[in-house]
Image (cartoon, rainbow, N blue to C red):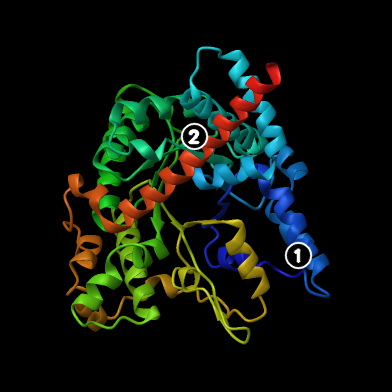
């Protein structure tokens, strides 16, 4: 048996998990496209590897390699674009059943349906594992990252869809208030658009307050889970790190940028482990560097041996598989390697890095203004608007057909 790169990673710490970073609805189509592009002699191995990660028949039996799935607005848009004819008809059905609903409400009901369908596909895994596996994250509307009431209402709607629906909440000050409230109601959460140690500390504190309330209310929390997302490459590449370094005449190599990202992740991880906090760190936004001769993925390799969730989008998994023969073996002690002190001193010249790395680097009201957060929230909001427009056009086509 040829072991998948991600299976090798999990072997460094059996408590680690690999999740699918897209809707389960698109997996089969993506798998077939991967197998069609498989190099000579690889197709059978790749087919077996992908079947171990996710096979709908095995999921119905309560088994799959992926521990869960995460989605966000761009990924949900992809799921709709993957089968536009089906979703156009679905939008027609939703609109006809809700004649008073405007475009925004029909959009939200459509989004809820994509989340429900994805969660239903792997619900047997959730039941078979007694709630330890088989979650699907559904995200509240990223256009409203500062609107507590709207995010809470949407989070409750998402959670009501299926017991394995984990609600994805942004790392804004208001978002952490929502995470506390959802936790107090026994609802699993995923903290997204989170990049910095101060955000992770705020999330842990919110979760702890929510757990105290839940336990005081006598809730059964045996199937509750919390994950805290670290959007690694986005921390180093879509925020202000490079611009601030350039403005100060500081040269940062690609490796030093990854060093910065990993230093933040490791600081949060080791703090959580030392304090015994029940939230699990989730690594996303990872990159493979491959020149055709050698390949590496430091976003995985530097964390090997840790108890993480690694959520992997289709394109990233494809990169790993294409580079599988050139990637070095994982070192299970990598998670315990400390960042270079001289490099940390260099990075600390940048306000952006201090905001991300220091435990008191930002106050909660500053989170939504942090460079990586603002950029990512804008991108997610744009994808949401595209989905709203798809819904609007589908509703217009229904009206034209009726006329």
Of the two numbered discs 1 and 2 in the rendering, the one whose residue sits closer to the viewer: 1
Task: Give the residue at mark 1.
Answer: 46
The residue tagged 2 is 223
Q: Give the residue displayed 59% in from the left and 29% down from the top.
A: 113
Q: Residues within 10 Å of mark 2 (few under 14, many from 20)?
A: some
Q: Nearer the viewer, residue 12 or 314?
A: 314
Relative to 214, is 77 above or below?
Answer: below
Q: Residue at x 78, y 73 (%)?
A: 39
Residue 318 position, x and y percent, is: 65, 65
| The C terminus sits in image quarter | top right
Name the side, left or right, on which 236 lies relative to 323.
Answer: left
**Side of 344 where 75 appears, left or right:** right
Q: Quadrant of the N terminus?
A: bottom right
Q: Residues within 10 Å of mark 1 (few under 14, many from 20)?
A: many
Please give the name of the residue rendered at 71% of the width and 33% of the height, measured from the top-left corner. 86
Q: Secondary structure at mark 2?
A: loop
- Residue 10 drawn above or below residue 162: below
Q: Is residue 264 above or below residue 301?
A: above
**Disc 1 from disc 2: Cα separation:** 33 Å
Q: Residue 352 at x, y = what percent?
A: 22, 65
The answer, for residue 306, to whether it is visible in the render is yes
């Amino acid at each position: 048996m040829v072991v998948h790169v991600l299976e090798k990673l999990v072997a460094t710490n059996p408590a680690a998990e690999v999740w699918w970073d897209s809707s389960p609805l698109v997996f089969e189509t993506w798998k077939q496209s991967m197998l069609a592009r498989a190099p000579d002699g690889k197709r059978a191995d790749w087919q077996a590897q992908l079947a171990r990660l996710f096979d709908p028949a095995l999921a119905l039996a309560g088994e799959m390699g992926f521990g869960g799935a995460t989605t966000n607005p761009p990924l949900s848009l992809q799921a709709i674009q993957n089968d536009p004819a089906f979703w156009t008809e679905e939008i027609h059905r939703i609109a006809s059943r809700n004649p008073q609903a405007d475009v925004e409400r029909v959009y939200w009901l459509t989004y809820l349906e994509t989340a429900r369908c994805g969660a239903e596909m792997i619900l047997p895994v959730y039941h078979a594992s007694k709630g330890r596996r088989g979650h699907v994250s559904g995200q509240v509307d990223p256009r409203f990252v500062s609107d507590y009431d709207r995010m809470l209402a949407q989070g409750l709607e998402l959670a009501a869809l299926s017991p394995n629906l984990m609600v994805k909440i942004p790392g804004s000050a208001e978002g952490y208030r929502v995470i506390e409230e959802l936790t107090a109601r026994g609802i699993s959460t995923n903290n997204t658009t989170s990049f910095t140690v101060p955000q992770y500390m705020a999330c842990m504190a919110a979760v702890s307050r929510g757990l105290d309330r839940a336990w005081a209310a006598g809730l059964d929390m045996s199937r509750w889970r919390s994950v805290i997302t670290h959007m690694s490459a986005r921390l180093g590449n879509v925020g202000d790190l490079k611009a601030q370094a350039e403005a100060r005449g500081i040269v940062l190599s690609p490796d030093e940028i990854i060093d910065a990202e990993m230093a933040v992740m490791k600081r949060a991880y080791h703090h959580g482990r030392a304090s015994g906090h029940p939230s699990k760190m989730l690594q996303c936004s990872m990159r493979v560097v491959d020149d055709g001769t050698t390949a590496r993925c430091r976003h995985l390799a530097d964390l090997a041996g840790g108890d993480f969730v690694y959520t992997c989008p289709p394109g990233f998994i494809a990169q790993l598989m294409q580079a599988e023969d050139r990637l070095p073996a994982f070192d299970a002690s990598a998670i315990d390697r400390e960042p270079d002190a001289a490099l940390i001193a260099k990075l600390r010249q940048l306000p952006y890095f201090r905001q991300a790395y220091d435990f008191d680097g930002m106050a909660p009201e500053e989170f939504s203004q942090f460079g990586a957060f603002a950029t990512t929230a804008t991108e997610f909001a744009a994808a949401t608007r595209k989905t709203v427009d798809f819904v609007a056009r589908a509703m217009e086509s229904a009206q034209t057909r009726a006329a």
